Image: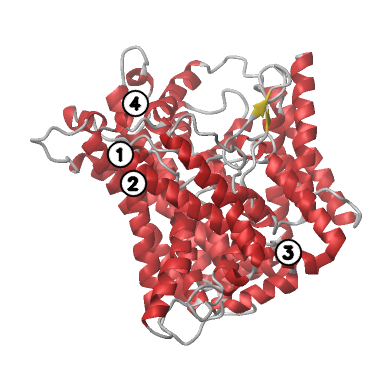
């Protein structure tokens, strides 16, 4: 695998061509996609461009460049087509910014709804108005705010001025998070790539796809018969399924598209029989030990949930029998151990940032270590001040920001190791407050905690996985890495503005309540209901001891497994699966992970690494065929089913 990765990285090495074209394409494409996503997501309800850790908003335009734009450029003249390193630049810039709308949509819905939906019955005016700072929400602007939810009268114009203050402060907060993620991705790259040698399946597949074009402008791997086998299987299934859009009686093939679940009892979660071609394709590049860990711990956790629910000893920890709390405890150990293992590298980076001594070569990084450290510390400090100004206790705010990045970095490592297309972080920054003793949080801290809950983003940790991947993919570009780093940061900030403007404008055109989306109708009001409930429940029994017992048990289990992982060479199971399996994203991906593990075991035992490499065109073809078929589905929705489309790509 190491030799194979080095071969792939070598393909991305840049020529002497100027970076201007690739930077322009990457920036314009990324900003445009983030401006379009609110329309496709809230209005068209078609293929989601933001779901998953490898969203279609990245893959679709990237593959169009590889398979459509590049051959056309080749036909116009020799040497004008995009080179592999230019395609890598486009992929990297777009990947870091692709989850902006998923985060911003819920945040915007939350800071817009307080004055619009407040009623005497929900008690928001009594409990939330005095705690949530005025600069954090849209002012009580009467009809001018109501028009956002109900649609703008024909004689009126969008009242942008009522949005300026809260949007500025929230975009600055999200911008600080994004910049901090890219900076820390730069800081940690050498440790993960050169010391721990994480596989980065997303980067591996992207570099494979960006392979140098052949004589006609198409990639060389298209000559492989296995590529077309991999292409045909998912493409045929999805295209056949599209026929059912027009005829309800059409005999559909649900394998690879729909989820079929089986319930074996009231005490256990459903068994999901879902196959996803993209999950299997990326999992092909994941270490066998990691794949084994995921499905084995899913079986163990499923049994535990059933037993604990059946005997009734887990009151107060939810329907999953304490598994969520265990995952949080285990994830804390996983994250802290990962940073402890990198302590020497981190110490060298910070020493270099604060002194003239240069012991590490950072010339090929996205930014110098000094720049990365100061940007990260600046982002950390700004988030701390923002939360404190919002009303959170300064000490608690420091703890939240600290674990915000600890959990983000830990989850980025999970994605770099597993390549899971759908996954959820067991912990987010504000979730660390779940271990706070009862009644230890004041009303102001509770209010900020609840409002910051809108940064949940389906537990995908915003730009941190993208920042780590960008640092990994940028290093082979040599001196151009600096240009890439600056482009990523600038494009990210521009995309934030574009996404916010697009969402607000669309709300006034069609009415946000007409979007039919969960975030505007359900999620946003829940955060203010949470303020009311949390304050009124102060002093009540929260089963704190039970929750902490499961959290401590999870920490102990992962701690012991981590020790065995490093102490015994024969230890077969990685602890990472223990932290992921209770969550919906992983539960619905289990069958795909298990089948990929079985296939890899057979391939490696029958034909070894040579047979494994011969299978790479098959999985690359699978990615391409599946993505292009979803593009066709999206076009069909845009033409024949506007507003009533079909989202075949889901899993968050």
Secondary structure state at the residue bearing disc 3: loop
Camera-side mark, 4 or 1 = 1
Counting residues from the N terminus, which is met first, the one under dot 4 or under dot 2?
A: 4
3D distance between C-alphas at marks 3 and 2: 38 Å
Quarter assignment of residue 13: bottom right
Residue 135: image tag: 1
For this orientation, the residue located farthest to the top is: 121
Secondary structure state at the residue bearing disc 1: helix
Mark 1 crowd level (few <14, some 14–19, many ≥20, 10 Å Cα) = some
The reply to whether residue 378 is visible in this rendering is no
* Number of disc labels: 4
Circles 1 and 2, Cβ within 8 Å, touching? The answer is: yes
Q: Is residue 333 above or below residue 68?
A: above
3D distance between C-alphas at marks 4 and 2: 19 Å
Residue 196: image tag: 3
Tell me if 571 is positioned left or right of 480 in this view.
Answer: right
Residue 169: image tag: 2
Q: Position of residue 456 (x, y in %)?
A: 50, 39
3D distance between C-alphas at marks 4 and 1: 12 Å
Camera-side mark, 3 or 1 = 3
Tell me if 175 is positioned left or right of 613 in this view.
Answer: left
Tell me if 73 is positioned left or right of 375 in this view.
Answer: left
């Amino acid at each position: 695998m190491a030799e194979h990765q080095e071969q792939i990285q070598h393909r991305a090495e840049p020529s002497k061509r100027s970076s201007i074209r690739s930077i322009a394409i990457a920036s314009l494409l990324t900003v445009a996609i983030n401006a379009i996503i609110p329309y496709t997501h809230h209005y068209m309800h078609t293929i989601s461009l933001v779901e998953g850790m490898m969203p279609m908003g990245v893959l679709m335009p990237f593959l169009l460049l590889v398979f459509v734009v590049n051959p056309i450029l080749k036909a116009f003249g020799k040497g004008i087509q995009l080179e592999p390193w230019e395609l890598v630049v486009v992929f990297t810039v777009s990947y870091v910014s692709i989850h902006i709308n998923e985060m911003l949509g819920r945040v915007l819905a939350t800071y817009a709804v307080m004055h619009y939906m407040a009623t005497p019955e929900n008690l928001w005016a009594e409990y939330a108005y005095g705690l949530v700072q005025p600069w954090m929400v849209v002012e009580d602007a009467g009809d001018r705010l109501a028009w956002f939810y109900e649609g703008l009268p024909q004689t009126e114009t969008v009242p942008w001025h009522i949005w300026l203050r809260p949007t500025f402060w929230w975009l600055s907060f999200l911008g600080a998070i994004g910049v901090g993620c890219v900076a820390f991705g730069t800081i940690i790259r050498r440790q993960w790539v050169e010391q721990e040698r994480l596989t980065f399946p997303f980067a591996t597949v992207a570099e494979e796809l960006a392979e140098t074009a052949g004589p006609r402008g198409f990639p060389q791997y298209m000559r492989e018969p296995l590529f077309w086998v991999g292409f045909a299987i998912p493409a045929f299934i999805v295209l056949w399924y599209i026929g059912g859009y027009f005829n309800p009686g059409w005999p559909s093939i649900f394998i690879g598209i729909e989820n079929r679940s089986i319930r074996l009892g009231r005490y256990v979660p459903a068994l999901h029989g879902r196959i996803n071609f993209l999950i299997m394709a990326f999992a092909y590049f994941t270490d066998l030990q990691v794949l084994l860990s995921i499905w084995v711990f899913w079986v163990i956790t499923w049994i535990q949930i059933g037993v604990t629910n059946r005997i009734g000893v887990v009151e107060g920890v939810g329907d999953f029998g304490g598994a969520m709390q265990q995952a949080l405890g285990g994830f804390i150990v996983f994250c802290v151990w990962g940073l402890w293992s990198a302590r020497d590298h981190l110490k060298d980076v910070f020493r270099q940032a604060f002194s003239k001594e240069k012991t590490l070569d950072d010339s090929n990084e996205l930014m110098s270590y000094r720049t990365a450290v100061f940007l990260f510390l600046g982002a950390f400090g700004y988030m701390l001040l923002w939360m404190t100004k919002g009303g959170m206790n300064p000490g608690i705010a420091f703890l939240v920001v600290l674990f915000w990045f600890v959990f983000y970095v830990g989850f980025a490592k999970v994605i770099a190791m597993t390549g899971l297309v759908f996954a959820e972080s067991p912990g987010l920054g504000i979730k660390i407050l779940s271990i706070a003793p009862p009644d230890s949080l004041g009303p102001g801290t509770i209010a900020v905690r609840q409002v910051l809950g809108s940064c949940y983003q389906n537990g995908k940790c915003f730009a941190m996985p993208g920042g780590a991947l960008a640092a990994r993919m940028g290093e082979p570009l040599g001196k151009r890495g600096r240009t890439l780093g600056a482009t990523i940061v600038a494009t990210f900030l521009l995309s934030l503005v574009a996404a916010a403007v697009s969402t607000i404008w669309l709300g006034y055109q069609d009415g946000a309540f007409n979007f039919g989306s969960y975030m505007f109708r359900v999620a946003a009001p829940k955060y203010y209901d949470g303020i009311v409930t949390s304050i009124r429940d102060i002093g009540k029994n929260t089963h704190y001891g039970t929750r902490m017992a499961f959290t401590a048990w999870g920490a102990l289990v992962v701690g012991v497994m981590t020790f065995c992982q490093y102490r015994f060479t024969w230890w077969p199971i990685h602890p990472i699966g223990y932290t992921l399996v209770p969550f919906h994203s992983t539960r619905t991906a289990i069958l795909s992970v298990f089948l990929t593990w079985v296939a890899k075991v057979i391939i490696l035992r029958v034909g070894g690494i040579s047979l494994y490499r011969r299978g790479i065109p098959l999985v690359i073809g699978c990615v391409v065929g599946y993505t292009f078929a979803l593009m066709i589905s999206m076009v069909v929705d845009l033409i024949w089913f506007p507003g009533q489309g079909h989202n075949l790509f889901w899993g968050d």
